[in-house]
Image (cartoon, rainbow, N blue to C red):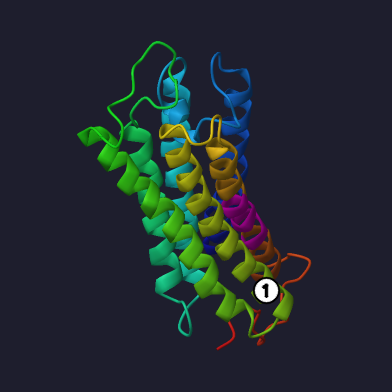
Amino acid sequence: MATRTLTALLGSGVAAGVLVPVLLWADGATRPGYSLWHHGASQLGTGERAWLQTANFVLGGLLLLAFAAGLRRILRGGRGATRVPALLATAATGMIVAGLVPTDPALGYPPGQPAPATGALTTSGLIHQAAGFALFAGLSAAAFVLARRLGQQSRAWAVYSRLSGALIIAFAFAAGIAYRLDVLGVWRPAPAGLLEHLSLLTGFGWIIAVGVHLLRSHVPGGPNTPPAGTQGPAQAG
């Protein structure tokens, strides 16, 4: 029963990593008036079919919470045992809140709905923005912290995890700059949407990779399960 539970918890991370980006890109590519280049992922939580992305973000956040619980079981003691699950739980909470509290209309989407005055945000917009920060910051920080733990046995995993953490925050920061330049009329249409989608894709790609790695190395019967009495990369230390 314990093995099944751990498998389900770690598999939840893989499921979240596939579900969230696929639904975002599929919905964005078929949504009238929406541009994957121009509009942020959060804009899909407004306008036509808004319910789909609300469900996507809430379900994705719940799956990510389950994944954090699975990591807590594996990272017993040592570096990141508490911080990594806590950071992923922060990201998951941010995603759930971002799904339940929609962002403001922006950059012409949804069509026909005016955006707030330049630089202004409604209460809903402010809450959504804070939730988005928690999502991106939590994912990025978790990747950096887990890199030290994984790096005890594999330098390649440490490099990949740190690179993912850097790209998550870099793409998110660049998306914010592109959005501001677009709002001010300096660069239209700026690739704010593409950059934000790349940040999410990087973060959830990292979650898929870590989830699959841990399933293989820590679930009995997996191809890379350590022999009895030994420790896998995430357990060392």
Q: x, y (%) of residue 88?
A: 44, 60
| Residue 205 drawn in magenta | yes
Q: In the current view of this chain or complex, which residue is farthest to the left?
A: 123
- Image point (62%, 77%), residue name: 150
Q: Residue at x 41, y 54 (%)?
A: 91
Q: Quadrant of residue 30?
A: top right
Residue extending furthest toward the front = 186
Residue name at image x 41 percent, y 35 percent: 184
Q: Is residue 151 left or right of residue 123?
A: right
Q: Residues within 10 Å of mark 1 (few under 14, many from 20)?
A: some
Q: Is residue 234 visible?
A: no
The answer to whether 14 is drawn above or below residue 194 in the figure is below
* Magenta span of residues: 202-210
Query: Residue 166: in sight, yes or no?
Result: yes
Above or below for 182 versus 227? above
Q: Residue at x 42, y 22 (%)?
A: 51
Residue labelled with disc 1:
159
Where is residue 222, by image quadrant? bottom right
Local secondary structure at mark 1 = helix
Residue 63 point in image, percent of width and height? 48, 47
